[in-house]
Amino acid sequence: MVYFFQNFLNALQWGSFYALIALGYSMVYGILMLFNFAHGDVFMTGAYIGLGTALFFTMIFSSGAVSVVPGWIILVLTILSSMALASILGMIIERIGYRPLRNAPRASAAITGLMIGIILETGNLAILGAQRFSFPSIIDTVTWEAGGIFFTNKKILIVAVALFLMAALHVFIKKTKWGMAMRAMSYDPLAVPLMGVSVNIVAPMTFAIGSGLAAAAGVLYSMAYPVLDPMMGVNLGWKAFVAAILGGRGSIMGAALAGFILGFIEIFVAMIFPSTLRDLIAYSIILAILTFRPYGFFGQAHSAQLRL
Amino acid sequence: MKRIFIILSLILVSAAAVSLNSCKARDKNVIRIGLNAPITGDIPKVGEGAKFAAQLWLEDIKKAGGIEVGGKKYPVELIIEDNETKAESAVKASTKLITQDDVMIIIGPFASKQAVPAGGVANNYKTPMVAPWSTNPDTTKNRPYVFRACFLDPFQGPVVANFIKDEFKFKKAAVLFDVASDYPKGLAEFFKLAWEKNNGPGSVVAYESFTTNDKDFSSQLTKIIKSGAQILFVPQYYNEVALIVKQAKELGWKGTIAGSDSWGSAETVKLCGSDCFGKFFSTHYAAAGAKGDTKEFIERYNKKYGYVPDDVSALTWDSLNITKKAIESTGGLTGDIKKDRTAVRDALAKIKKFKGITGEMTYTDSGDPQKCAVIVKINNKGEFEFYKSVCP
């Protein structure tokens, strides 16, 4: 039982990353009917931006070697600033990568995403070099034990922040005017501009929100796994894409839920079977799910509208 | 008239072809040495260490006016190729060095993942190759032209297993390794074999794996902790070591963690921090507490590049000096690169009691030297401290 709960916590943390990244894929699909394949690399860039801002804030808020503000303030600033900067990056990607191709064939737009991804990876490699960076430990890790189950303050923080961001996104899309505009846009991209809401505002906004969430995931991820490398977004990006499909295209709730489900499948397969077979078995299970539910958990056969 | 014109133009074309050809032919009075190193990719620090050591070595050679063979001094040219830490790029780099750059000998690749396939290329082209850091047996197996400057996985596995048994008297061990990479996989198997020979079958209570680029090891580590193992053996490279050690601590692991020579990088402590203090690993040399030539090398390197060299740098240094010794003992170069390559190969296979900075090496007509391993403890200052020497 202890063993099960320990793995449950592991899966909760691991699923948070998939969920946060999958949201970006699903939102963009809902609005523009295409997957932004650069999304995994936006996550990577977010982590690197987080590294930069974390070092920056630690530097300006410290006198000598002692920090004058508590670690959590620096952490909040780091997450917010990297989300903001990554949102700008998302809007730039939309502007130069997708807007000129909005009426081009879908395949061209998919290729654009891959190209932007490669540019981000190799650009990082060219600017920062190939060495790995260690993410600073902004808050001290505290390990607790409760009945044989070990957990850290970071683990709780990661899951809590991830859930908070998902709830915030839910409220935004459901309650605000701009959220309504996004839902309307995915419902009818031709009629909504006639009502005075431009695609050129809604699309960048979607990219900005998705990229911001990816950057938050990047910073949280770097806290849990503090070794940064330029290719860190590739694998995770692809798997989060699987989660977005599994959740149902355009479904916000689906993407979040499927992210956690994917995390749980990966962790529990490794718990039960030899870990060598983890991905083989985990992704066979997902293939089987998709065979029976080809549109994912919350997907609909002939629509990919943005839904909650 | 027309015929004369045709003949003239034919002569012109063939002359042009000949002159182009002679441009391509290399200067026979220069010894070219290729370095096939991971300058970019997963382990760039390894490539950097190798490059710096090779450049330091080249300085010495230049100061001496080249390598003296049969009474004649030959200048040396070093050609560095990046293998991007990829097997296919390593094969490409070696092929280019052999067929286009006409090198006499290749140093590298470094990780076994690249050295095993690239060794096949070198052997097929009958070009000697010295892999400084590859400990997988397949690198040199049935390949007369391929050598190495370090010991082998089958040797390192038992070294760690025996050391743990003698030092801590532990009975139960766990292993966590990358199943998609030759080096950790090979070493994990040899460790398991040796451990079960010492402590009986089933004494490796958890044998867990992951695949390259994985960052989350929580489910494997939870399994390992549940198995009741007393020691965890992690034959991984520095970026994974940092993640595994940290995650193990967070999940409540209380036992010892031991590793292999792949830990021996300055990056290990940089990425891992104080969590890695007190951990053990087997390696080729220990920087803290070195004497003689080894100390001199460390000081020179540190002065020039600003950090203490890794084992990769030390082994690259030794590989280049074995190369130099082998070229010298051929007794004279013919200028025919194919003949000279074979002569260098034969001389390499006969090197006895060579005093390298990573220990004394003897080759007995196989590509693998006989030498000792060192057990290193990461002390509380984050230095690699000599703990014990283990000989075969």
Image (cartoon, coloured by chain):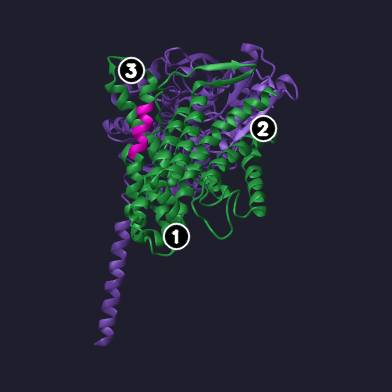
**Closer to us: B306 or B219:** B219
Nearest to viewer (mark 1 / mark 2): 1
**Closer to us: B218 or A159:** A159
Q: Which mark is residue A188?
A: 1
Q: Residue at x 72, y 22 (%)?
A: B203
Please tell me in which quadrant of the rendered image residue A15 appears: top right
Task: Give left or right: position of B279 versus B312.
Answer: right
Task: Give left or right: position of B302 versus A302.
Answer: left
Q: Which residues are magenta?
A: A76-85
Q: Earlier in the sequence, mark 3 or mark 2?
A: 3
Specify the colour of chain B. Answer: purple
Residue extending farthest to the bottom is B1
Image quadrant where one finds the N terminus of chain A:
top right
The residue at which mark 2 appears reads as: A271
Confirm whether circles 3 and 1 share one chain: yes
Gap between marks 1 and 2, in whole Å?
45 Å
- Picture coordinates of residue B328 (x, y %)? 40, 35
**Closer to us: B345 or B170:** B170
Please tell me in which quadrant of the rendered image residue B303 appears: top left
Amino acid type of the residue that numbered disc 1 sits on in the rendered structure: Asp
The residue at which mark 3 appears reads as: A69
- Picture coordinates of residue B357 (x, y %)? 43, 23
